[in-house]
Amino acid sequence: MNETTIQQTLERIKSLENKIDRLSLFINKLLNSPPGQKKPVALIFAKVVLTGRFSVSRQEMRRRLEAVGMTITTNVKEADLLLFGEYAGSKLLAAKSRKIHCVSEDRLDSLMSSVFQAQWPSKASGKKEAAHA
C-alpha cells in the first residue's frame, strides 16, 4: 500500500469510529429516556432528499447529515425522509404524495440537538447563507 491509500484508510476508519460513537450516544439516549417521554426519531441511516433554502449552505447541510450517517439522494422515490427549508416546492409535494416523512430544518435541528447535544450545530450557531433547491 502506498502512503495515500494508508491515509485514506485511516481517515475512513476514523469516520466510522465517529459514526459508531454517535450511534452509541443515540441508543443510550433512546434507552435511558423516561417512560412517557417522546423517543428520538431514528434518522441515523436515512436516505434524505434536500429541498428549499436552508439557514446554512447546501454543502454544509449535506456535510452535517453525512457526519451523522445519513445519505443524501436527489431521488424522492428512494428517500426515507425529505428535509425542507424555506421555499420548498415540487419535491415536498412529491414526497407528501408518496407518504415520505417530511421534516423542516427547524424540527431536524431540534431532534438532532437533543440527541447529539453540542455535536450538532444549531441554526443560531451557523452563518446565514442562501442555498437554493
Image (cartoon, grey):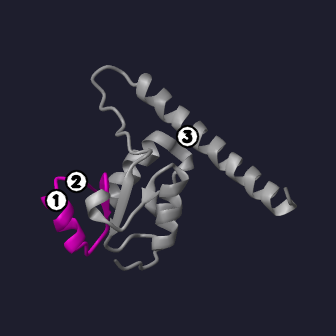
Front position in the image: 1 or 54: 1
Residue denoted by label 1: 96
Q: Is residue 89 above or below residue 101?
A: below
Instruction: Pinpoint residue 19: horizontal percent, then vertical percent.
Output: 58, 43
Q: Is residue 12 above or below residue 58?
A: above
Residue 86 picture quarter: bottom left
Depth-wise, is mark 2 or mark 3 nearer the camera? 2
Magenta-drawn stretch contains 33? no
- Residue 100: which disc? 2
Q: Is residue 106 visible to the viewer in this orientation of the structure?
A: yes
Q: Earlier in the sequence, mark 2 or mark 3?
A: 3
Identified at 51% across, 58% down, the residue is 64
Residue denoted by label 3: 22
Q: Quadrant of the C terminus?
A: bottom left
Q: Earlier in the sequence, mark 3 or mark 1?
A: 3
Q: Secondary structure at mark 1?
A: helix
Magenta-drawn stretch contains 95? yes
Instruction: Pinpoint residue 81: horizontal percent, then vertical percent.
Output: 31, 54
